[in-house]
Image (cartoon, grey):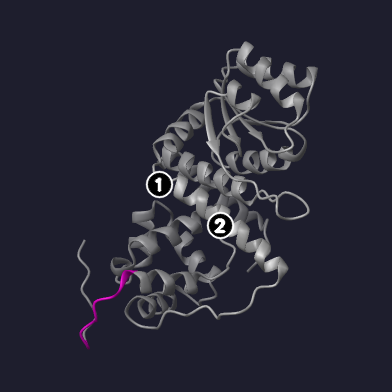
Amino acid sequence: MGHARDAGQPLAVPDAARIAANLRGLLGDHRLSPSQRRIARYLLEHAQEAVFFTSADIAERVGVSQPSVTRFAAALGFRGFPEFRDALRSSVFGGPQRALPAADLNEIQELVGSEIRDLERLRDGLQDLTQLRAVAGQLARSRPLLVMGLRISASLAHLFGYLAQKVLPDVRVLDTAGSTLEDRLSRAAEAGAEWVLAIGLPRYPRELADGLVWARSAGLKIALITDQPVGRLIELADEVLLAPVSSDFAFDSHAGPTVLCTALLHTMLDTLGTEGQAQLEAFDDSATERQIFLPY
C-alpha cells in the first residue's frame, strides 16, 4: 500500500541519531504495556515511514489491533492518533536534540554511574545474539517452563515467571529449597518439562546447587543467569548467560540481571511469533475490559 507525502514545503533529510533522540523524548517515561512497547519499538525502527501511516497501517505491521494503537496514543497523553502522528512528524522532521546538563556528581550519582557502566558491559556482551536466541527458543518450547530462584534470586525468578505467564501456558516458579524443590522438579519433568531457567546471584545458596544437581538427575537441562563465569553453578549448567552485579552500594544491585531477564523474555516473545503476540493482545484486551489497571 502506497502513502503519499503531505503537500507543502520539501522535507529535510532527517538525521538518524536526532530522530532516535527526539522519539525517545516523545515516548518519555510513560508506563507502557507489552503491546504498546512493541508499537514504540516499531516506531523507533521505522520512524520515517510511520509518520505517513494510519493507525490501521501501524497495527497491521506490528501485529496488534487498531484499538491498541489508539490506546498507545492515549497512553502518551494525546487526544487521538492524528494528534500523536503530528507530534511524531515533528520528532522526525524537526526539533532539536535535547542536551543533557553538565553537573558535578554526588556520591549516589557516582554509584549510579558505576551501575550504568555495568549495563554498558552487558550491552556490549550482547552484540552477538546467537546464544540468547538459542536459549530463548529452548525455554519458549519447554512445557512446562521452570524458573528457579532461591533467597536473593527468588524475587527476580518471580518477576520472570509473572511476565512469562502472559505468553506461555504453564510457567512454574520454584523458590523453596529441599525435598519440596526436588518433588516439583521431578513432577515437572514427568509432565514434559525439558528446561529450567535458574537464577544464581551472590551470595550463591548451597541449596541452589543441590537443586540443579537434582534437576540434572531428573533429565532437565539448565539455563543459568549469573554474574561470574566460573564456579560450582557454572559447572552444573548447560547454558550460561552472564550479567554483572554491582557491589558498590551497601547492598548488591541486580539491575544487570534484571535487564538480561527482560532481554531474554523479549527474545522469547519474538521466538513465539504470532502465537505469543496473540496471547499478549488477549491479555491487554481482557485487562482493559475488566479495568484491571488505573487509567493513565
The answer to whether residue 88 is left or right of residue 288 is left
> Which residue is found at the position 62% from the left and 53% from the top?
287
Which residue is labeled 1 in the image? 127
Say above or below: 241 vs 191.
Answer: below
Residue 220, quarter of the rendered image: top right
Q: How many other residues sit within 10 Å of disc 1, few (<14), some (14-19) or many (≥20)?
A: few
How far across and how far down the image is residue 226, in percent?
A: 61, 36
Quarter of the figure that contains the C terminus: bottom right
Residue at the farthest bottom position: 9
How far across and how far down the image is residue 291, in percent?
A: 66, 58
Confirm whether the magenta stretch covers residue 13. yes
Say above or below: 263 vs 97.
Answer: above
Quarter of the figure that contains the N terminus: bottom left
What SS does tag 2 mark? helix
Which residue is labeled 2 in the image? 117
Tell which circle, 1 or 2, labels the residue nearer the N-terminal end: 2
How far across and how far down the image is residue 190, in percent?
A: 62, 13
> Which residue is found at the position 45% from the left and 50% from the top?
124
Numbered circle sitting on residue 33: none
Say above or below: 194 vs 133.
Answer: above
What SS does tag 1 mark? loop
Magenta region = 8-16
In this view of the protein, which residue sits in the foreground, 289 or 123?
123
Mark nearest the camera among 1 and 2 is 2
In this view of the protein, which residue sits in the foreground, 46 or 244?
244
> Which residue is found at the position 50% from the left and 32% from the top?
140
> Which residue is found at the position 64% from the left and 38% from the top?
161
Dominant SS of magenta comes to loop
The tally of labels here is 2
Confirm whether the magenta stretch covers residue 172. no
